[in-house]
Image (cartoon, rainbow, N blue to C red):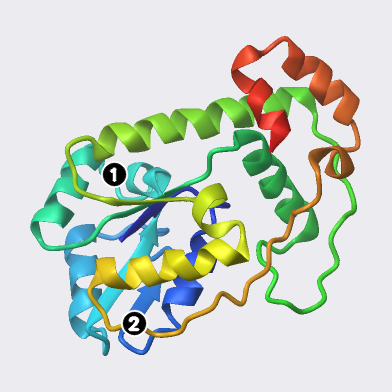
Amino acid sequence: MIFAQGRTGSTLLTSTLNMHPDIRCDDEILIVPRVFPLKFVERAARVSPTSAYGFHVKITQLHAWQRLHDVAGFLAHMERRGWTIIYLWRDNALRHVVSNIFAETAGTYHMDGGEKTRPEKITLPLPRLERELKLRLKLREAERAALHGRAFHEIQYERDLQHPERQIETFATLQTVIGVPQANITPRLKKMVAAPLADLIENFAEVTSWIAGKPEYQRYLDG
C-alpha cells in the first residue's frame, strides 16, 4: 500500500511497479466512497492475477471519502493483515505547491516522454501559496502521526525518485521489500517541472520577499 499525497511521485511509482510481471499496483481506488473500504481493498488483492498487489491512497481520501477518522487504526489493521506500507513523501513543500499548480494549469499531471504543452511560468498568489504550504505540512504531520508505531518503507521523492540514477536502486530495493524476484523495471514518466524556481514562478521576487519573513519556509528556495 502506497500512503502518499498527490504530486509526490506516486504515479511514477505505481506505473513503474506495474511493469513487473508479479506486481499489480492500482492507483487511487479509494477516491470514491466504499461501504466497507477494508474489505474492498482486500477483495481487490484476492482477485489480482499477480502474487503482489497494491494501491495508492491519500490520507485525505481516508478522511473525506471513507469516513475513516482513525487513520492510525486503518494502517495498523493493514499491517496486521500482512500489507507492506510504503510511505512516499516530498520534502520541498514549495516545489510541491508549484508542481500542483503547473499541473492544474497544463491540464495534465504527468509526462510520459511525449510532447506535452505546459506553461513556461506560473504566478503564485501569496494567499494561495500560504494556504497550500500550510496544508501540505499539516497533511505531512498527520501522515506521520498515523504511521507512528507502524512498520513501513520510506521513500522520499527528492532522494529516491527525482534523479534517474537513484531510481534504479530505489526500485531494486522495493522489489526486495515487496518480496518479488528482481526484474529490470525503468520509469517511463518524466519530471514535469524541473527548472529552477526562479524560471518557473513569474512573481518570484514577490515570493522570495514573502518567504524572507517566514523562516520555516526559507530552505525550500534552495530546492
Could you tell whether 211 is left or right of 4 in the image? right
Query: Which amino acid type corresponds to the residue marked 2 in the rendered image?
Result: Gln
Q: Work out how far the residue at label 1 is from the one at label 2, CA to CA, in angstroms.
A: 38 Å
Image: 56 above or below 215: below
Query: Which amino acid type corresponds to the residue marked 1 in the rendered image?
Result: Arg
- Please identify the quarter of the rendering in which residue 59 is found: top left
Could you tell whether 101 is left or right of 1 in the image? right
Which residue lies under the disc numbered 1? 67
User: What crowding class fits label 2: few (fewer than 14 Cα within 10 Å), some (14-19), or many (20 or more)?
Assistant: some
Q: Nearer the viewer, residue 26 or 157?
A: 157
Residue 81: x and y in percent read: 10, 61
Could you tell whether 84 is left or right of 203 in the image? left
Q: Nearer the viewer, residue 185 or 126?
A: 185
Which residue lies under the disc numbered 2? 182
User: What crowding class fits label 1: few (fewer than 14 Cα within 10 Å), some (14-19), or many (20 or more)?
Assistant: some
Q: Residue at x 52, y 44 (%)?
A: 90
- Please identify the quarter of the rendering in which residue 211 is found: top right
